[in-house]
Amino acid sequence: MEIKELKNRPEKYQDKKLYASYTQFDKLLMELRTKKLPKGTVESINNGINLVNSVSESEKELSKQIKKTQSLIIKLIEKEHKLVTKNHYRNTWLAVGMAAFGIPFGVAFGASLGNMAFLGIGLPIGMVIGIAVGTGMDKKAFEEGRQIDLEIKH
């Protein structure tokens, strides 16, 4: 089974943001067409494409549906097939590092120095740890051939 094509829309050229998200979604679909995906996954992707193609001419509605469908497809392929986009793990682990490592380091600095104003010092430390862990995971995904040649920009 083949992944469907997006309907060509002339109005996408009017709005720069819509054009960027439409082009990014189309590139995601082109990358997925190069992968060997099972029938069930292709059907789910085609259902999402049908939703995008069936949206009326409203640019706001179309943009919203593209982002929603793209997000669902990315989650599906990550969960089912462990395929990820470029810098996926880096972006995810940046926030995790700040929350899981940065805040505790900041509390430790603040408590040891007797001034909780040093709480903020831990956040950049956690961010660096998160970026390092995420970049390592991205590199591993690339080496295993699980990375899609696309970086998602929201």
Image: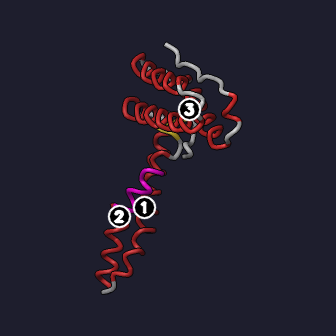
Q: Looking at the image, which residue is at 40% across and 29% down?
A: 81
The amino acid marked with disc number 1 is Ile
Residue 28 numbered tag? 3
Dot label at residue 129: 1
Can residue 56 be seen? yes
Q: Position of residue 9 (x, y in %)?
A: 66, 27
Characterize the local packing of mark 1: few (<14), some (14-19) or many (20 or more) Cα atoms within 10 angstroms. Answer: many
Q: Secondary structure at mark 1?
A: helix
Q: Position of residue 72 (x, y in %)?
A: 43, 34
* Measured Cα–Cα span from mark 1 to mark 2: 8 Å
Q: Secondary structure at mark 2?
A: helix
Marked residue nearer the N-terminal end (1 or 2): 2
Q: Magenta stretch containing residue 96, yes or no?
A: yes
Asked whether disc 1 touches disc 2, contact meaning CB atoms under 8 Å apart, the reply is yes
Of badges 2 and 3, the one in the foreground is: 3
Let me know if residue 144 appears in the view. Answer: no
Residue 101 tag number: 2
Q: Which residues are magenta?
A: 91-99
Q: Mark 3, residues whose alpha carbon is within 10 Å: few (<14), some, or many (≥20)?
A: many
Main SS, magenta region, reads helix
Q: Residues within 10 Å of mark 2 (few under 14, many from 20)?
A: many
Q: CA distance from mark 1 to mark 3?
A: 29 Å
Q: Is residue 20 magenta?
A: no
* Earlier residue among tags 1 and 3: 3
